Amino acid sequence: MRPAVLTGEHFMTGDVACAEGAMAAGCLFFGGYPITPATEIAEHMSARLPEVGGTFIQMEDEIGAIASVIGASCAGVKSMTATSGPGFSLMMENIGLAICIESPCVIANVQRAGPSTGLPTQGAQSDMMQARWGSHGHYEIIALAPSSPQEIFYQTITAFNLSEKYRLPVLIMTDEMVGHLSERVIIPDAKDIKTVSRKRPKGRKDRLKPYRPGPDGIAPMPIAGEGYNVHMTGLTHDERGYPVMTVDAQYEMMERIIGKVRKNLDDIIRTESYRLDDAEIVIVSYGVSSRTCLAAVDEAREQGIKAGLLRLITVWPFPEDQIRNLAEKVKGFVTVEINLGQIHLEVERCAGGKAPAFLVGHPGGTIIPPERVINTLNEVF
Amino acid sequence: MKQIKKPSSHPLDDLLRLDRIPHIWCPGCGIGTAFSSCLTAMKTSGIDLKKTVMISGIGCSGRGAGYVNLDSYHTTHGRAIPFATGMKLANPELNVIVFSGDGDLFAIGGNHFIHAARRNVDMTVICVNNFNYGMTGGQVAATTPYKAKTTTTPLGNSESPFNLPLLAYASGATYVSRWTILHTRDLMESIEEALLKRGFSFIEVLAPCPVNYGRRNREKPLDSLRIYQERTIIKNNAHPSELDIDFEKGVILGKFIDQDRPTCTEMYDKTCRPTDLSEESKAA
């Protein structure tokens, strides 16, 4: 029987590293449904969870999977699911429920090329806007984009921590290439892994207002069976959790669920720079494509082009201020992603016409080679 | 002006969120009766109410979770059962009750129902069957009788309805019964039995929807109750294949299935847990 944290040096795929990251984060429930190229996460969790007292269930579809995950979370257990495009589409409505009732949970999307069934075994980064806006209504969401198995391990822990801290679903937007890539993964000692659990209410059980935010803007979360007689609903609700069908209630609820992300951007947003300090051209990328860009930056520098990389670790919320600041001083932006222009639109929006923004995109199915990035740099600058 | 006398307290008050009353249910609607039978059964069964949760989907019956003064979850349309499954598996100590309507549980949520029954998740599912989608104004449902008029079958329903107890039985439910809201004592006793039963229990409650269903089918509120009295036959242990709903021929009520099968959690612990871990949990 293995412990939750498999301390040591491993050679594993991104999918398995995601599962091990979840184990290390304290995940005790996985509700899944098989789908290429995310299935290995479910397979690995099905073997690992019972070893530590957790529960795995393969549900009847992805809608059931995400619903079970939210139910488990409301019962007080850190919970997750993993899927790919078609399953991600099916999960959208209930991701909205988790946002509305403020239930923490983690959803990994190992992206493959779409639309529809698309290229099930070949990767893409084309669900990035769906991650942002796929569920109906207006909301804020957190989405991470790991670029290696080692990073998936850590980002899955980060995803759980952010989810528990901010009481909202956190998306791990990885891709088939990273998911199926085997690399060295070092898992540290359990004591060196920082995990966060949701704040729980204190005080009289009959007086709790389960949606009254604490000083940090986040309401402590009562769980089922504790005696708080909590009510949670996907209808617009007040601090008691009761449905209230008024514009005022809508204002108040939206302010809370959007504000808790917008007021904490510094805590949430994570980016990484490579040779960016003196860069005249900023390459913006994330996930597997950012690996292409590391090579492209070095090659461009050799050719005398002052390029640098801004790698997005959190894609949502988008690092708007960082792009705005860069736009004041650089010649332009090039976004590299395996879709035909999604995060590129955000870069262009935030550049606000102060610096031109170009796309090196791909319809999906393979990675973008560094040469395409170099060629674009040579063509447009 | 005449003062309205403050109503005296009701024995179920402590189980209600009184600050949410009045409820949304229409005059003549049967959901309230089914709901109060459920609350009474929860009390009389002696289950630990602190460890009891009610989960609903969307629709008129789906508002049940909003009125019960327990941990209660009003989820998305059709997804009360998978939400409840996650909750039960995450904390097997909870008593899980799903209270929802026929459209929610058997059309949009039908897939989840059959799988939860197959897995024998230890929960009680109470379906208020009012033969139509009441909340959206009376559209055809998977339970609407043949030829009945609804807003989306203005010429009459051309499809056949589900026999819900047969579906539950075939899917593996360990307790299956059907009552109407006129048979409140039987209904209450049946819910009580279901709550105490380990395994997947299903109770169908036939209920009138005079505003949206009755009025389009020449059935006044009192007519529904008369039909429930005159055209029903109580036949415990009837085979589920006999349970099609046809009030012309007579509708069979009763307890049809009461069998024992290991639950989802028991089977998981036995099959998937390392031996020393399942023995630890037994000892605990």
Image (spheres, rainbow, N blue to C red):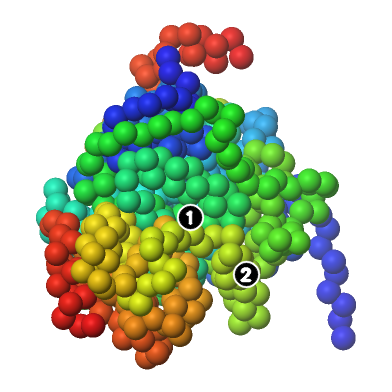
Q: Name the residue under label 2.
A: A263
Mark 2 or mark 1, which is nearer the start of the sequence? 1
Q: Position of residue A289 (x, y in %)?
A: 26, 59
Query: In the current view of this chain or complex, which residue is farthest to the bottom?
Result: A353
Query: Is residue B121 placed above or below A251 in the rendered structure?
Result: above
Q: State how far apart marks 1 and 2 are (Cα).
A: 17 Å
**Mark 1 burial class by Cα count in 10 Å: few <14, some 14-19, many 20+:** many
- Badges 1 and 2, same chain: yes
Viewer-side label of 1, 2? 2
Residue A293 or residue A305, whichever sits in front: A305
Residue A28 at least partly seen: no
Residue A171 at least partly seen: yes
Under circle 1, the secondary element is strand
Tag shown at residue A150: none
Q: Which residue is drawn at 37% across and 91% down?
A: A353
Q: What residue type is labelled 2?
A: Lys
Residue B267 or residue A258, whichever sits in front: A258
Q: Name the residue under label 1.
A: A169
Q: Which chain carries label 1?
A: A
As drawn, is A304 to the left or to the right of A273? left
Q: Position of residue A155 (x, y in %)?
A: 44, 47
As drawn, is A150 to the left or to the right of A3? left
Q: What residue type is labelled 1?
A: Pro
Q: Position of residue B211 (x, y in %)?
A: 46, 73
Q: Residue at x 55, y 35 (%)?
A: A193
**Mark 2 burial class by Cα count in 10 Å: few <14, some 14-19, many 20+:** few
Quarter placement of the C terminus of chain B: top right
Q: Which residue is drawn at 64% across and 31% down?
A: B47
